[in-house]
Image (cartoon, grey):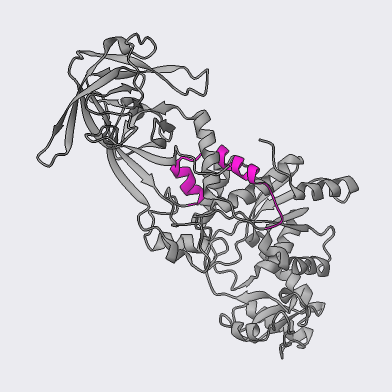
Amino acid sequence: MAEAENFIQQIIEDDLRSGKIASVQTRFPPEPNGYLHIGHAKSMFVNFGTAEKYGGKCNLFFDDTNPSKEKTEYVDAIKRDIRFLGYEWAKECYASDFFDTIYEFAEKLIVDGKAFVCDLSAEEIKATRGTLTEPGQESPYRNRSVEENLTLFREMKAGKYADGEKCLRAKIDMASPNVNLRDPVIYRILHATHHRTGDKWCIYPMYDYAHPICDYLQGVTHSLCTLEFEDHRPLYDWVGINLGFDPKPRQIEFARLNVTNLVMSKRYLKKLVEDGSVHGWDDPRMPTLAGLRNRGIPAEAIKDFCSRIGVAKANSECEISYFEAVVRDYLNAHAPRAMAVTDPLKLTITNYEGSEEVDFEINQTDGNAGTRKVPFSGELFIERSDFSLDPPPKYYRGRIGGYVRLKNAYIVRCDEAVTDENGNVTEVKATYLPESRSGSDTSGVKAKGVIHWVDANSCKDVEIRRYEHLLRDADYAGQDFSERMNEDSEHILLGKAEPYLATAEEGTAFQLMRTGYYKKCTENGKLVLSEIVSLKDNFNK
């Protein structure tokens, strides 16, 4: 499918045509404070994809300016996720690589009279910030001399003061209509061990201050950010202009990806992991890239989804059913077919002797995929829902006296149902029509229903895992995530699978006939089939 229109590409093409830039340099800038989710896949698609389109380069840039929340574990996970999606970075950079230079630039702002050390607490700064209609109040420490500010700032760096006791603020305009320009904090005191620099620093730059500096030091031409940074762009430009950056990187904002029924907040995803609501960051129900990968969703489908939704300037929300439809389209074209029974019911063919193998299409959408052999005998398992003692109207599956075709095998007539003391069916006895074999049927009997099955003598026990969305609904006006959580989102079934699934390569995605798309894995010697996406398409095209 053709890529949707992209306004960022129009801007870049204008910059290249005008000679404003000679080549394109972008960066993908995650903070290593959690695992990436599907929303970050769009940012990767934009940053890596834009650089690739114009023969440029994209760096992996870790915004590690808040050591209290960042871990090497998250750095490693982010790199795995990027490679999972098939991207490779030109350089691996960290904000902490530039801490010395960022600090020197802060002293330059102080010397130029454009930054001051403030003794107000975070609460006091917030209280004097003003509102959208009223200007803020200047700090009583705003007019300290350059010498006093340098002394205090160096004392902050030396560890003389406690967390929150002082901060460094840019001196801009407390009456600015943009609240972000009302003397923003650019350095705070934080006595915390950094995952890379250890205890070298006890002051750390704020993101809005470090962001333009790190972009400039990397040679970034276009700093592509999500839309919440649009109001921060004047501060991004102020830093670049007042530090004399030439050329100054250009910040461009695009709409972030929001998907219904998914938790799209790293903070809340972390909470789900920590309180045990999920099995970990890579739980198949999680919208993290680790979770999607563990679920069996192909990287190509995720990238196709990002391409289809396009890059827009206005925020919007995408239906989860659309994402699932894109995944389903990909798997339908690529996943081999197999059979498994999720709620087994014994089917005994009383007039069948011996065993044989029947041909089975590997993927009927691919003419070159070929066929494979599936074992068949007189003892099978079928789905319990494929037989009824009291069938409703238009029920074309197993019923007493009725005919049904076993997929790619024979037509059988259900003759008898064996029940237990509670009236539950424990076995169905049937007779088959020898001349009704698929591909050479001369029986003259037309069976309206076709059901899947597995051979009871060669099948394997399997644990089948099915998932629902973590959030119950798409409409969440006024509700937080905790009010929408689906507490029953994982279901474990014990079924039977054809032996082919047990020998297949780990992680292979299969279409289980009439059931859904599942990933094969083995855990402690146990065969597991984990649901990727259902067969049913709920997306309203």
Q: Residue at x 52, y 17 (%)?
A: 368
Would you say residue 299 is visible in this rendering?
no
User: Where is residue 298 drawn, in percent x and y?
Assistant: 52, 38
Between residue 239 and residue 224, name the one nearer to us: 224
Q: Residue at x 53, y 54 (%)?
A: 260
Find residue 93 and report its image quarter. Answer: bottom right
User: Where is residue 355 drawn, in percent x and y?
Assistant: 24, 14
Does residue 386 show up magenta in the picture?
A: no
Between residue 287 and residue 349, name the one nearer to us: 349
- What secondary structure is the magenta-colored segment mainly? helix
Residue that lies at the very extreme toward the right in this rendered image: 18
Find residue 271 and report its image quarter. Answer: bottom left
On screen, residue 36 above or below 299: below
User: Where is residue 406 drawn, in percent x and y?
Assistant: 32, 22
On screen, residue 303 above or below 440: below
Residue that lies at the very extreme toward the front in this rendered image: 393
Between residue 305 and residue 410, name the one nearer to us: 410
**Residue segment shown in magenta:** 287-314
Does residue 306 show up magenta in the picture?
A: yes
Would you say residue 353 is visible in this rendering?
yes
On screen, residue 415 above or below 180: above
Q: Residue at x 11, y 37 (%)?
A: 420
Q: Where's the N terminus, which quadrant? A: top right
Q: Is residue 93 left or right of residue 445?
A: right
On screen, residue 162 above or below 370: below
Number of numbered discs visible in the structure rendering = 0
Residue that lies at the very extreme toward the left in this rendered image: 421
Q: Is residue 412 left or right of residue 150?
A: left
Q: Where's the C terminus, which quadrant? A: top right
User: Where is residue 390 drawn, in percent x and y?
Assistant: 23, 36
